[in-house]
Image (spheres, rainbow, N blue to C red):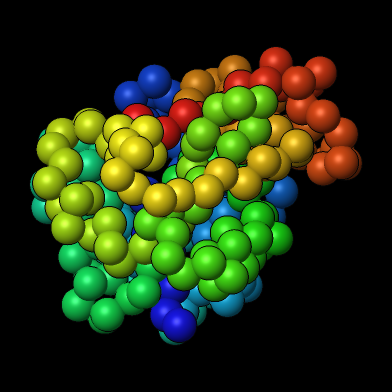
Amino acid sequence: MKIGGVYLAAGKSMRMGKQKLTLPIHNTTIGSMALREAVQSSLTTIYVITIGNHTWVDQDLLINKKCMFIECPTAARGQAESLKWGVKHANIAKMDAIIVLLADQPFISKKLIEQLITCFKNETSLDFVASSTAGITMPPILFSATMFPRIKTLEGDKGAKAFLKNKAFHGKRLIIENTRLFYDVDTEEDYRNLLFYANKSFEKDLNHCYGGKMKTFK
């Protein structure tokens, strides 16, 4: 079974006011953290969707054979364009499914990615497998190839959340207790918090230190 990753890294970083993926954390960057986890997972290929700027990528990841860096010419129109661009390449490669990952969620782990993959492999009739914590559905989310035609119909900033609510699609939500995994960096304050808590144990509940800030799926 071939499952690819679609790593969305073509955002404008408007709330940050500068390219947030290049911001350093220890010996790496915000944008490289989750990508490294994806590379170490059993994903077949990771389609890294960008606007052509790869300065945020650690050198070893930039040359990693599992990573395919793809410039999305219509990224300015919204996140749906980047997602569709990734699905296009996954479809060409005849992927059985994709996992959508956001580059500004630095704590996404290999373990979480593998949980999504295992769930799908155990029940291949599923159209999607979503992550869920505190009752909120968010990326990373696995979409079966059965969903590719629907994803291709998305426009602008409209994401795939509506599909997850559509009873016509058969999906499953994995309940993840560790909210830290879904922390996303949008502002300078988010970045300061990230640096402050980067060395904290991943076993601790981030509702106490991050206020439970998480990225929902549009």
Against 1, residue 77 (above or below) is above
- Nearest the viewer among 36 and 157 is 157
Q: Position of residue 65 (x, y in %)?
A: 44, 83
Q: Position of residue 60 (x, y in %)?
A: 54, 74
Image-based side of 178 in relation to 25, left or right = right
Q: Position of residue 125 (x, y in %)?
A: 42, 65
* Numbered circles on residues, count: 0
Residue closest to the far front: 168
Q: Quadrant of residue 177?
A: top right
- Decide if residue 17 is in sight here: yes
Image-based side of 47 in relation to 137, left or right = left
- Nearest the viewer among 114 and 59 is 114
- Split into 4 quadrants, where in the image is the C terminus? top left
- Nearest the viewer among 35 and 57 is 35
Q: Position of residue 92 (x, y in %)?
A: 20, 77
- Nearest the viewer among 32 and 5 is 5
- Split into 4 quadrants, where in the image is the N terminus? bottom left
Q: Quadrant of residue 211?
A: top right
Q: Residue at x 70, y 60 (%)?
A: 111
Image-based side of 145 in relation to 1, left or right = left
- Decide if residue 46 is in sight here: no
Image-based side of 141 in relation to 109, left or right = left
Q: Residue at x 22, y 50 (%)?
A: 151
Q: Quadrant of residue 184?
A: top right
Against 81, residue 179 (above or below) is above
Q: Residue at x 32, y 37 (%)?
A: 166
